[in-house]
């Protein structure tokens, strides 16, 4: 069965890049660009893994992560956090809030692919 | 030629005439008749005691010595009457509502009925007035001697001292007779005032007569006089600016503070409305008094060179064989001198008696402080003795000073002395924060400086102050020299003394007042003085008597019941020999009424109620009036507190706001680095991802390849632009930018901006509406930078305008000489909370996808406009997003 990724990101070009990389590897990629409705979108799509940007319109990725971790249904959902801010504090916050992985932009394509694969592996 | 016998006979007749007038006036006043006695004319004429013998004789001498400077003595009071009439009115109102009896009483009463202040002002007044009384005695004696020179047989009259003694005794008698006849509740002396008004007329007529004689009898009319003035040495005397100003100030201050002026102006005032007439009539009187001074001086110099110019008014007619005119002139001078001495003696005796003698007498016999018969007698006796003592002092001063000093000099010394009361007086009228200690400090310090710098040196370097002190300062301390205090050597002695005494006086008054806090009683009195117009009616005139009684009846009916009140009033009227229900409001009746009312409402309330109606009746601290005032003051104070706390609240709110803004800014500052990081990494992410995709040899369509390389290209450009913006902003912010100022036109810059931001392929179309006519404005600016701002605004409209058919209107207008260019789109605008931050860095409001910029555009615009000397602001309330770019005058200078 095709594994599904939900990509929550607002930069069109980055969405296109990540979608291309994962699709080519056989993933089904859904995308979502708004922070405020992101949690609902996760619930609706019920993906196998979420790639979550930090700086989103209307709501921060950290807040979304907290909500996901607070909900039993998504408590264990693998979440890969991406950020362009890349400061130490962001990494710490991501870990504290329970991100499964944390990566700084720009990333190597292979790195993202490996991470996603690892997160959904049994 | 007039014999001395004739002179004495005329003098005695004149005095008898004055006696008669005073007597009749007094009698009519007691009968309640003679309304003319209280006419504005009599009031104005009584003010003329300002013109003493110094003015009558001395002005001519003054003019001979110093030219026009004598005019200052008239200008001061004129300015007060014209410009400061409201101060006079306030003084009179307070004088009546508080039953003030003298200037000392005024100061004492204002500062919490402090007897210490009363004593200080009394002493100051006595010391300041004594030389002045001596001066009057001297002038009368001198004028006698002028006549006696022609009749050497009468040697005894030539003895100046004896003449002065006779005059002093005569004046004391007159003053005692008419000044202390009764203890009027308001210390009014109708007889004396009327006599003085008559004397005022006599001296005016005398001086005008001499003047007319001099101009038309001696010289050949006004033209000839003018020619003579121009030819005389008087025309060459220069005015000294400092002295001129000081003397005007001094005479104005003296006009308000002289005890005798206070007596006629405030205490003897019968009706407040008289002030309005006096406001123009008194300056007119002064004008007439000064009109012929220079002509007499000039003619005198021609007729009697070398003679005492102080006596020209007398000696010139005498020399030219005009015996009768000289006699009239003598009577004028005599009137000037006697009226001043009489009023001064009355005023001073009231002060001495009320503030020095009576307090001592009362404390000597404790307990019986009620106004019983024997206290009354004691007051009258002390008044009479005081009058005698004051005239004796004046005579003594006359004897000791040797009578040699020029008249004007003594007058000025005296003026400067009494002017020390001014700060405490005026401060007390207008400033509730003035305190007793402040007034005392100012008075004592000012008085001491005056005595040290002017009064003591006036005796010459022998009496009281050794010559060595005058020369080298006390103990050889140079900067303490009496006439060069603190090393100020260049000033004229009078200017010097007035400057230091008034300055130190005022500074001490304010400083000590500010250091302390007024005691409750001072606060009460201060409120009543400063706000006198709020709680006192206009002073009643003569016709007020009946109305007063009626008001009292109305009030009494309310308290006692109509029948009882009417019966009581009718009884009182009957006792006074009157029919009807309205008795005269004599003190006896008022007292009875108060007692009656007290049985119903209590003594304090009764006193206050009656006092309010009779207007004059004493308003003491215990009165409800005062209590009410205290309440009012407390209310005022608490409302001030409230205002204060509201203000504090506002300040706190502003501080909080500022703090929030600062915090927001600092967070923003913190966020700045991570923002830069974000803005740089985002395009780099795309570039790296797609180049890796392109580098890897996976399956890829031609179209994808093309698309990905375009993205890489665009993102590279975006990155470059971002770096450019950052550099641009940094350069602008650090002020390292070089502007390329040029002459250009607004239309050209706009044209360039519009065409540079024309819609590209795939971009949303934006319609731009312009008004080419208005854009025709010449500018001196940096066209590239200004265009950059415009481009930015157009680009923003293109990016963010959310209307279906986006449209941008560019309007140009002139406003206060500046040119404003408004960019208004038809979108939904920027929400109010965001309007404050849009000019901050990275303050992008919408999501990235639509923005495409780094959020630095408006920040850069702001910096650019700042550098160009203009401004860019968000213009709320225009429907869509609206930005206003204003180019200041200098930039748009070529516009006209």
Image (spheres, coloured by chain):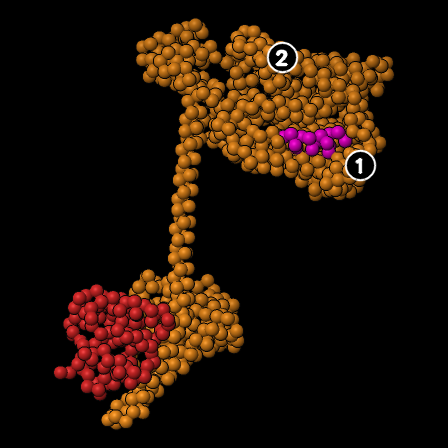
* Residue name at image x 43 percent, y 10 percent: B592
Compute the Cα span from label 2 to label 1. Answer: 45 Å
User: Could you classify mark 2 by the number of other residues whose Cα lies within 10 Å: few (under 14), some (14-19), or many (20 or more)?
Assistant: many
Q: Earlier in the sequence, mark 2 or mark 1?
A: 2
Percent position (x, y) of residue A81? 28, 74
Q: Which one is in front in this view, the residue at disc 2 or the one at disc 1?
A: 1
Q: Quadrant of residue A66?
A: bottom left
In the rendered picture, chain B carries what hue?
orange
Q: Is residue A105 above or below residue A64?
A: below
Is residue B445 shown in magenta? Answer: yes
- The residue singled out by tag 1 in the image is B476
Percent position (x, y) of residue B386? 65, 15
Q: Secondary structure at mark 1?
A: helix
B340, B511: nearer the viewer: B511
* Residue name at image x 64 percent, y 38 percent: B503
A69, B698: nearer the viewer: A69
Q: Which residues are magenta?
A: B443-458
Q: Secondary structure at mark 2?
A: helix
Q: Which mark is residue B382?
A: 2
Percent position (x, y) of residue B12? 71, 13
* Residue name at image x 41 percent, y 22 percent: B624
Q: Name the main secondary structure of what is drawn in magenta.
A: helix
Q: Is residue B544 above or below residue A52?
A: above
């Amino acid at each position: 069965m095709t594994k599904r990724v939900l990509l929550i990101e607002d930069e069109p070009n980055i969405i296109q890049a990540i979608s291309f990389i994962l699709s080519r590897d056989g993933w089904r990629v859904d995308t979502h660009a708004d922070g405020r409705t992101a949690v609902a979108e996760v619930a609706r799509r019920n993906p196998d893994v979420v790639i979550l940007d930090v700086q989103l319109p209307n709501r921060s990725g950290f807040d979304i992560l907290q909500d996901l971790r607070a909900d039993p249904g998504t408590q264990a959902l693998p979440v890969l956090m991406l950020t362009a801010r890349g400061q130490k504090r962001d990494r710490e916050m991501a870990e504290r809030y329970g991100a499964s992985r944390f990566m700084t932009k720009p990333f190597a394509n292979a790195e993202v692919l490996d991470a996603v694969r690892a997160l959904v592996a049994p | 030629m007039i014999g001395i016998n004739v002179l004495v006979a005329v003098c005695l007749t004149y005095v008898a005439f004055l006696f008669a007038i005073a007597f009749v006036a007094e009698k009519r006043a007691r009968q309640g008749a003679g309304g003319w006695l209280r006419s504005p004319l009599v009031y104005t004429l009584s003010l003329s005691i300002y013109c003493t013998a110094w003015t009558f004789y001395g002005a001519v001498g003054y003019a001979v010595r110093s030219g026009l400077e004598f005019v200052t003595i008239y200008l001061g009071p004129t300015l007060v009457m014209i410009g400061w009439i409201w101060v006079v009115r306030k003084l009179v109102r307070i004088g009546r509502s508080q039953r003030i009896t003298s200037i000392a009483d005024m100061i004492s009463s204002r500062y919490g009925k402090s007897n210490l202040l009363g004593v200080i002002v009394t002493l100051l007044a006595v010391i300041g007035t004594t030389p002045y009384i001596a001066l009057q005695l001297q002038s009368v004696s001198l004028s006698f001697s002028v006549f006696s020179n022609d009749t050497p047989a009468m040697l005894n009259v030539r003895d100046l001292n004896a003449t002065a003694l006779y005059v002093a005794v005569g004046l004391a008698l007159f003053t005692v007779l008419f000044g202390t006849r009764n203890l009027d509740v308001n210390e009014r002396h109708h007889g004396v005032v009327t006599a003085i008004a008559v004397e005022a007329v006599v001296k005016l007529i005398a001086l005008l007569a001499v003047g007319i004689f001099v101009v038309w009898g001696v010289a050949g009319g006004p033209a000839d006089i003018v020619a003579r003035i121009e030819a005389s040495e008087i025309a060459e005397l220069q005015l000294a600016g400092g002295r001129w100003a000081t003397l005007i100030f001094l005479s104005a201050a003296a006009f308000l503070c002289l005890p005798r002026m206070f007596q006629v102006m405030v205490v003897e005032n019968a009706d407040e409305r008289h002030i309005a007439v006096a406001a123009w009539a008194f300056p007119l009187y002064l004008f007439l008094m000064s009109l012929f001074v220079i002509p007499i001086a000039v003619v005198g110099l021609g007729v009697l060179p070398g003679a005492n110019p102080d006596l020209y008014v007398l000696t010139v007619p005498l020399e030219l064989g005009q015996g009768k005119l000289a006699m009239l002139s003598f009577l004028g001078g005599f009137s000037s001198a006697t009226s001043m001495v009489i009023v001064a003696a009355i005023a001073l005796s009231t002060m001495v008696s009320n503030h020095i003698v009576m307090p001592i007498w009362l404390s000597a016999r404790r307990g019986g402080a009620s106004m019983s018969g024997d206290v009354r007698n004691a007051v009258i006796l002390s008044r009479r003795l005081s009058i005698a003592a004051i005239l004796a002092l004046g005579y003594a001063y006359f004897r000791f000073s040797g009578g040699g000093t020029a008249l004007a000099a003594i007058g000025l010394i005296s003026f400067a002395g009494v002017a020390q009361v001014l700060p405490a007086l005026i401060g007390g009228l207008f400033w509730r924060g003035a305190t007793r200690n402040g007034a005392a400090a100012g008075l004592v310090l000012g008085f001491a400086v005056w005595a040290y710098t002017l009064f003591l040196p006036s005796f010459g370097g022998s009496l009281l102050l050794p010559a060595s002190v005058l020369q080298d300062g006390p103990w050889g301390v140079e900067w303490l020299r009496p006439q060069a205090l603190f090393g100020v050597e260049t000033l004229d002695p009078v200017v010097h003394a007035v400057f230091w005494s008034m300055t130190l006086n005022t500074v001490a008054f304010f400083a000590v007042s500010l250091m302390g806090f007024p005691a409750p009683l001072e606060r009460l009195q201060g409120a009543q003085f400063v706000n006198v117009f709020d709680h006192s009616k206009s002073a009643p005139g003569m016709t007020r008597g009946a109305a007063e009684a009626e008001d009292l009846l109305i009030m009494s009916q309310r308290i006692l019941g109509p029948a009882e009140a009417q019966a009581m009033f009718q009884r009182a009227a009957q006792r006074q020999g009157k029919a009807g229900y309205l008795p005269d409001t004599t003190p006896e009746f008022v007292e009875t009424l108060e007692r009656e009312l007290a049985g119903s409402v209590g003594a304090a309330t009764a006193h206050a109620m009656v006092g309010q109606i009779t207007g004059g009746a004493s308003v003491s601290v215990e009165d409800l009036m005062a209590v009410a005032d205290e309440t009012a003051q407390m209310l005022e104070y608490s409302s001030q507190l409230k205002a204060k706390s509201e203000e504090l609240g506002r300040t706190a709110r502003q501080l909080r706001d500022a703090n929030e803004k600062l915090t927001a800014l600092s967070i923003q500052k913190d966020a700045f680095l991570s923002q830069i990081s974000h803005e740089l990494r985002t395009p780099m992410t795309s570039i790296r991802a797609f180049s890796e995709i392109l580098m890897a040899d996976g399956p890829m369509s031609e179209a994808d390849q093309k698309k990905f390389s375009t993205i890489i290209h665009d993102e590279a450009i975006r990155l470059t632009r971002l770096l450019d913006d950052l550099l641009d902003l940094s350069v602008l912010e650090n002020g390292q930018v070089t502007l390329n100022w040029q002459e250009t036109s607004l239309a050209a810059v706009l044209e360039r901006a519009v065409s540079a931001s024309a819609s590209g392929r795939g971009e949303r179309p934006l319609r731009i509406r312009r008004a080419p006519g208005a854009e025709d404005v010449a500018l001196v600016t940096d066209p590239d930078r200004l265009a950059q701002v415009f481009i930015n605004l157009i680009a923003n409209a293109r990016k963010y305008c959310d209307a279906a058919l986006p449209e941008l209107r560019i309007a140009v207008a002139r406003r206060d000489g500046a040119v404003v260019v408004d960019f208004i789109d038809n979108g939904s605008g920027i929400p109010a909370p965001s309007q404050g931050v849009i000019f901050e860095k990275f303050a992008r409001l919408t999501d990235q996808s639509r923005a495409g910029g780094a959020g630095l555009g408006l920040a850069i615009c702001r910096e650019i406009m700042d550098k160009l000397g203009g401004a860019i602001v968000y213009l709320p309330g225009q429907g869509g997003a609206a930005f206003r770019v204003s180019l200041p005058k200098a930039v748009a200078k070529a516009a006209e």
